[in-house]
Image (cartoon, rainbow, N blue to C red):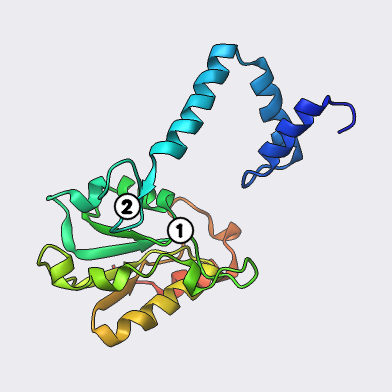
Amino acid sequence: MLEYSEPVVKLIDEFKRLPGIGQKSAQRLAFHVLRMTEADVQRFIAALEEVKRKIIFCSICNNLTDVDPCRFCSSTGRDRSVICIVEEPYNLVAVEKTRGYRGLYHVLHGSLSPIRGMGPDDLRLNNLLPRLRPENNDGVEVREVILATNPNTEGEATASYISRLLKPLGVRTTRIAMGMPVGSDLEYVDEVTMDKAMTNRHEI
């Protein structure tokens, strides 16, 4: 890094702090910024400042929003008897893309991970149980909670923990199906995915 001037090194270091960005990607981003016009840089800065100033957590589902409650929680067209729990706001977007789900959401903003120091108290779960009461859900009783956490060790641990929380309440708790992704090849599927696919097989 000694070949770069100090301001460039600082910019590269800041980009490296972003998730999934390594040294080479950080360098590419830094030099892209250097090639940007002054107007483009100012627009970029303004967008960063605006998102930090205006975006908040929805007080009901924890989704990122600029209005409270968010557009999902305030919508009269959503099925309030079903709540889908996801780890991150971008997981919610993935579910919405299917256009098949019309219920509500609950965003955890993380998953259980002792390695990363993420415990139950670090997840946004405090406002989940109150939502299951009809008086806090526009008079509608929640009949199903869908656990749509990621199909990895941390996601499985999170789903298991939440299911244990919900079991005494008698609410139907389901887990999203996991297995072979559509369009994939058996040759390249790992043993865990294959095991899930066999377990979740259905009659045709």
Residue 197 screen position, x and y as percent: 45, 69
Pointer 2: what residue? Answer: 58
**As drawn, which residue projects farthest toward the bottom?**
168
Q: Nearer the viewer, residue 99 or 133?
A: 133
Is residue 203 visible to the viewer in this orientation of the structure?
Answer: no
Task: Mark 1 and mark 2 in contact? Answer it, CB < 8 Å.
Answer: no
Cα distance between the residues tagged 1 and 2: 12 Å
Which amino acid type is marked by label 2? Cys
Pointer 1: what residue? Answer: 109
Residue 196 screen position, x and y as percent: 47, 71
- Which tag, 1 or 2, sits closer to the chain's start? 2
Q: Quadrant of residue 168?
A: bottom left
Residue 126 screen position, x and y as percent: 36, 70
Q: Quadrant of the C terminus?
A: bottom left
Instruction: Residue at 67%, 37% (x, y): give it.
Output: 15
Instruction: Residue at 13%, 50% (x, y): give it.
Output: 77
